[in-house]
Image (cartoon, coloured by chain):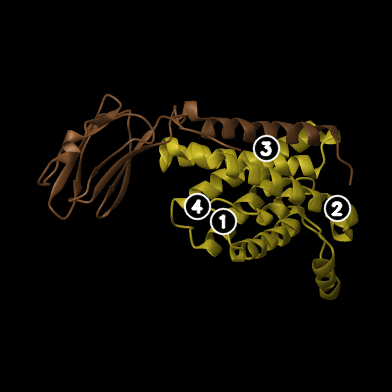
Chain colours: A brown, B yellow
């Protein structure tokens, strides 16, 4: 079997395409962060980039999660003390809000500054 | 399809079994291999939905140098139908992925082999076909099913195409060099 010039050209071009797609998919800067909402009945992922109000069913009723201007907050929840509503809004990866009584967890994943790390060791 | 002169039945039977005579003979045989290899492919577990070895494309790869373009494209369609029948996706939108991927790969491989004939082997042709097919399927997945998130499946999918394409190409190259059937099929046309 003889490998010819264009075999190598094609292999390099294909490898380049793979590298390009990997950069596009995995580089933190190029991906907008996502809002992950975990409720009693499952998990939903929403882009933080488009505004909306999501209603999540829980054992007490519906928790309303509002996404506005790349931040998310719990707008209302049928829980007794409204700790979750008092939690304010979140906007950066790793931040989260929870309404324990109604079993809703809201967190932000991925995205531009994943670098809010306290310490790292190799 | 060229018509042959009538000959004794026995001789005709021997010809059919041993000698690829016409593009139709070769297309039929390679098409049958597509069906068989699709079944083999289907048996192999896949780590991710789109990831496959692509062995059902081997007959198409071999056909690049054997068949005239219309027969070659017919073989690609036979492969799509074979694959879809065996995986049970013939009447679902999944078959469109197969169709688009296979036709793109087939045309890319044909063009590569005809344009840069002397300086590309089956390895390069096969890699080109595999990556072209996968790229088109990702584009369709992005447009139809997954939207933006399709980007996340692209790297492993394209990388798989690169590796399986190269391996399949190496096999085809070796097969073409050693097979007497292949030599006869080339000589017959």
| Above/below status of B41 relative to B129 | below
Whether marks 2 and 1 lie on the same chain? yes
Asked if disc 2 and disc 4 are in contact, CB closer than 8 Å, the reply is: no
Going by the image, does A76 lie left or right of B78? left
The chain identifier of the residue carrying mark 3 reads B
What residue does disc 1 label? B47
Q: Is residue B144 visible?
A: yes
Residue lying furthest bottom in this view?
B10
Q: Residue at x 17, y 44 (%)?
A: A63
Q: Secondary structure at mark 4?
A: helix
In the rendered image, residue A68, in percent from the top left (x then y), is placed at 24, 27
Name the mark nearer the viewer: 4 or 1: 1
Residue B96 locus on image (x, y percent): 49, 48
Residue under the image location 70 percent in, 50 percent down? B60
* Residue A47 in picture, x, y percent from top left: 34, 34
Residue under circle 2? B174
The residue that mark 3 highlights is B108
How far apart, in angstroms, are the residues tagged by discs 1 and 3? 27 Å
Task: Identify the element where label 2 is drawn.
Answer: helix
Q: For this rendering, which residue is in front, A88 or A45?
A: A88
Same subunit, labels 1 and 3: the answer reads yes
Answer with mark 2 or mark 1, whichever residue precedes in sequence.
Answer: 1
Q: Residues within 10 Å of mark 4 (few under 14, many from 20)?
A: some
Local crowd size for mark 1, using a 10 Å CA cut-off: few (<14), some (14–19), many (≥20)? few
Residue under disc 4 on the same chain as residue under disc 3: yes
- Label 2 or label 4, whichever comes before in sequence order: 4
- Which residue has dot 4 on it? B95
**Could you tell me residue A30's position as x and y percent?**
48, 27
Chain for numbered disc 4: B
Q: Say left or right for A79 vs B110.
A: left
């Amino acid at each position: 079997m003889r490998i010819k010039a264009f075999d190598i050209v094609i292999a390099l071009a294909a490898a380049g395409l793979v590298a390009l797609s990997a950069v596009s998919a995995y580089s933190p800067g190029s991906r907008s962060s996502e809002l992950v909402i975990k409720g009693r009945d499952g998990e939903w992922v929403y882009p933080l980039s488009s505004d909306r109000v999501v209603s999540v069913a829980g054992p007490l009723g519906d928790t309303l999660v509002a996404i506005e201007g790349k931040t998310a907050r719990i707008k209302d929840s049928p829980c007794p003390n409204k700790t979750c509503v008092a939690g304010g809004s979140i906007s950066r990866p790793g931040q989260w809000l929870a309404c324990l009584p109604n079993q809703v967890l809201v967190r932000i994943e991925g995205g531009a500054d994943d670098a809010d790390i306290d310490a790292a060791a190799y | 399809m060229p018509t042959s002169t009538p000959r004794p039945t026995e001789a005709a039977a021997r010809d059919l079994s041993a000698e690829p005579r016409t593009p139709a003979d070769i297309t039929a045989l390679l098409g049958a291999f597509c069906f068989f290899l699709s079944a083999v492919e289907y048996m192999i577990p896949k780590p991710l939905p789109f990831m496959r070895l692509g062995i059902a494309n081997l007959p198409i790869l071999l056909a690049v140098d054997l068949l005239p373009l219309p027969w070659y494209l017919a073989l690609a369609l036979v492969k799509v139908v074979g694959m879809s029948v065996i995986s049970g996706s013939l009447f679902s939108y999944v078959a469109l992925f197969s169709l688009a991927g296979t036709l793109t790969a087939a045309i890319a491989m044909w063009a590569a082999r005809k344009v840069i004939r002397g300086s590309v082997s089956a390895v390069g042709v096969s890699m080109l076909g595999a990556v072209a097919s996968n790229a088109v399927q990702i584009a369709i997945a992005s447009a139809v099913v997954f939207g933006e998130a399709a980007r996340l499946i692209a790297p492993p999918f394209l990388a798989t195409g690169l590796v399986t394409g190269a391996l399949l190409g190496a096999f085809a190259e070796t097969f073409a060099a050693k097979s007497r059937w292949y030599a006869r099929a080339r000589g017959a046309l």
